[in-house]
Amino acid sequence: MSDSKAIKTSPWIRGIVDTLVGAALLRSSSIPTKNRLVVILVDTAFETACRAFLKNNLKIKLDQNHTRRDNLVKTVRSKLPAIDEQVWNKIEYYYTDIRCDFYHQSAGKTLTDGDLLDYQKD
């Protein structure tokens, strides 16, 4: 495809996509705790996407309140009422009960492939 016909991607989208591509590459690797790393990367992409959405799509000036994840997600939720409550609950569950433990406490834990697919599908 020529450069003139290439789809232009915003710089903030490219970084999020690259993070998700990294997660996909890890998922196909043979690293025993790969799913632990994938969850951390997918969650990082989600949080980055939330900030990018507020800043670039809604033109909201991010401040100290948006450095805290709970405030960030609360703001995004208020702007996206069409997203089902179950999706938000799953995001919260994987962050609070899975990702935080993986990131801060349990380097040896991981998820099954089925659990990881469940997390990524919503």
Image (cartoon, rainbow, N blue to C red):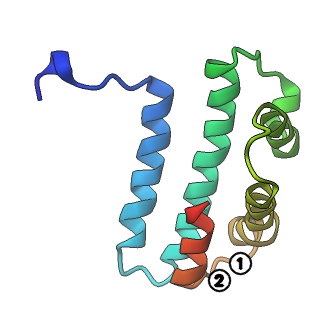
Instruction: Report the residue at 68% width, 37% height from top.
Output: 50
Instruction: Report the residue at 55% width, 57% height from top.
Output: 41
**Residue 23 x/y as whole percent:** 45, 60
**Secondary structure category for the residue under label 1:** loop
Q: Is residue 24 left or right of residue 5?
A: right
User: How busy is the neighbourhood of tag 2: few (under 14 within 10 Å), some, or many (20 plus)?
Assistant: some
Residue 57 is drawn in which quadrant?
top right
Residue carrying label 2: 109
**Secondary structure category for the residue under label 2:** loop
In this rendering, the count of numbered labels is 2
Nearest the camera: 22 or 86?
A: 86
Nearest the camera: 42 or 101?
A: 42
Residue carrying label 1: 106
Residue 116 is drawn in which quadrant?
bottom right
Residue 119 is drawn in which quadrant?
bottom right
Q: Residue furthest left?
A: 2
**Residue 112 x/y as whole percent:** 57, 85
**Residue 13 x/y as whole percent:** 48, 32
Q: Is residue 62 left or right of residue 10?
A: right
**Callout 1 amino acid:** Ser
Residue 112 versus residue 10 in the image, above or below: below
**Callout 2 amino acid:** Lys
The image quadrant where one finds the N terminus is: top left
**Residue 83 x/y as whole percent:** 73, 46
Instruction: Report the residue at 80% width, 71% height from top.
Output: 97
The image quadrant where one finds the C terminus is: bottom right
Instruction: Report the residue at 57% width, 47% height from top.
Output: 45
